[in-house]
Image (cartoon, rainbow, N blue to C red):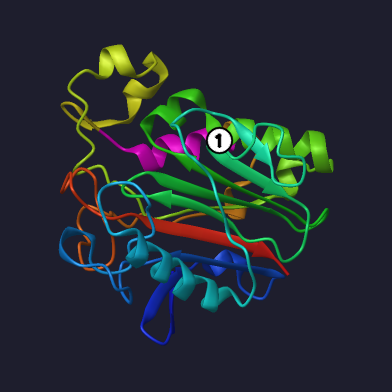
């Protein structure tokens, strides 16, 4: 991934999206005004941080994108996909899609994956939030189905990137036999630990995304405290965000 900076705010960009009419960023925790466990660029309104700090952090991120407003979902760890134009489900769900230029779509996360789906043929965009529950519900497949329905997108033409997220060294699920379908069990790397990155990659391939059309960061949020908040590492913490917009 490529590290970028505007003033004090830092973010990472995917190589697969470079030189395309798509602005995007996985924002680090650097460059904000929040304090304590929320330091510094906390973008989550829940958790106990001062609202004035979160709003200032969101304003700084907006500066990096040069246009407003940024659309944040009320995420519920399900598989609902919201068309930002029609807003069929309001702004509650775990994925956003659009074919409108200059509309930044945001997903908040702290260990969960964020998938960015870009269709360069039909100029359409989707962003999806996927914790382990999202993997079980296959939110990535649901996002692709929504893009096919609304924009006539074809999976073999779509480029996909998966954000930094919880890595296999810290993905412990002691109740995995109750939580995961049996098809996930093959991705166990040691007793009770799972490679969620490999699960996501397998789901994308099964959805007909071409292997050379995907980029999975494989950067662990738990291990990289300087850049990312982590729910597994600390229960009282801030929230990162991944944002993308068509140009």
- The image position of residue 17, as x and y in percent, is 61, 66
Pick whichever, 26 or 58, lies toward us.
58
- The image position of residue 41, as x and y in percent, is 33, 68
Q: In the rendered image of this protein, does residue 184 appear above or below residue 74?
A: above
Taking the spot 53% from the left edge, 45% from the top edge, the residue there is: 73
Pick whichever, 138 or 199, lies toward us.
138
> Magenta span has 201?
yes
Task: State the quadrant of the C terminus.
Answer: bottom right
Pick whichever, 166 or 184, lies toward us.
166
Local crowd size for mark 1, using a 10 Å CA cut-off: few (<14), some (14–19), many (≥20): some
Q: Which residues are magenta?
A: 194-205
- The image position of residue 179, as x and y in percent, is 32, 17
Q: Please, what is the dominant secondary structure of the magenta stretch?
A: helix
Taking the spot 28% from the left edge, 54% from the top edge, the residue there is: 220
Q: Secondary structure at mark 1?
A: loop
> Magenta span has 175?
no
Q: Which residue is mark 1?
A: 92
- From the viewer's perspective, tell me whether residue 143 is left or right of residue 77: right
Q: Quadrant of residue 156?
A: top right
- The image position of residue 4, as x and y in percent, is 45, 80
- From the viewer's perspective, tell me whether residue 23 is left or right of residue 222: right
Q: Quadrant of residue 26?
A: bottom left
Q: From this viewpoint, which residue is outermost toward the top?
A: 178
Pick whichever, 185 or 228, lies toward us.
228
């Amino acid at each position: 991934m490529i590290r970028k900076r505007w003033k004090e705010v830092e973010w990472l960009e995917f190589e697969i999206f470079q030189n395309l009419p798509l602005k995007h960023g996985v924002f680090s925790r650097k460059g904000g005004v929040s304090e304590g466990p929320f330091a510094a660029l906390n973008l989550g309104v829940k958790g106990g941080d001062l609202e004035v700090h979160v709003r200032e952090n969101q304003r700084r991120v907006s500066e990096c994108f040069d246009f407003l407003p940024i659309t944040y979902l009320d995420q519920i760890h399900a598989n609902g996909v919201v068309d930002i134009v029609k807003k069929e489900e309001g702004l509650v769900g775990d994925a956003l899609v659009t074919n409108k230029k200059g509309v930044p779509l945001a997903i908040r996360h702290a260990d969960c994956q964020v998938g960015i789906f870009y269709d360069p043929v039909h100029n359409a965009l989707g962003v999806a939030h996927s914790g382990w529950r999202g993997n079980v519900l296959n939110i990535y497949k649901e996002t692709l189905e929504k893009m096919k329905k609304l924009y006539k997108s074809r999976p073999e033409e779509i480029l996909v990137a998966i954000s930094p997220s919880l890595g296999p060294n810290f993905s412990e699920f002691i109740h995995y036999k109750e939580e995961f379908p049996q098809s996930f069990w093959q991705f166990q790397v040691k007793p009770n630990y799972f490679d969620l990155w490999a699960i996501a990659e397998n789901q994308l391939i099964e959805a007909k995304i071409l292997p050379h059309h995907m980029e999975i960061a494989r950067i662990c949020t738990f291990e990289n405290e300087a850049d990312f908040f982590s729910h597994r590492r600390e229960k009282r913490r801030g929230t990162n965000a991944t944002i993308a917009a068509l140009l």
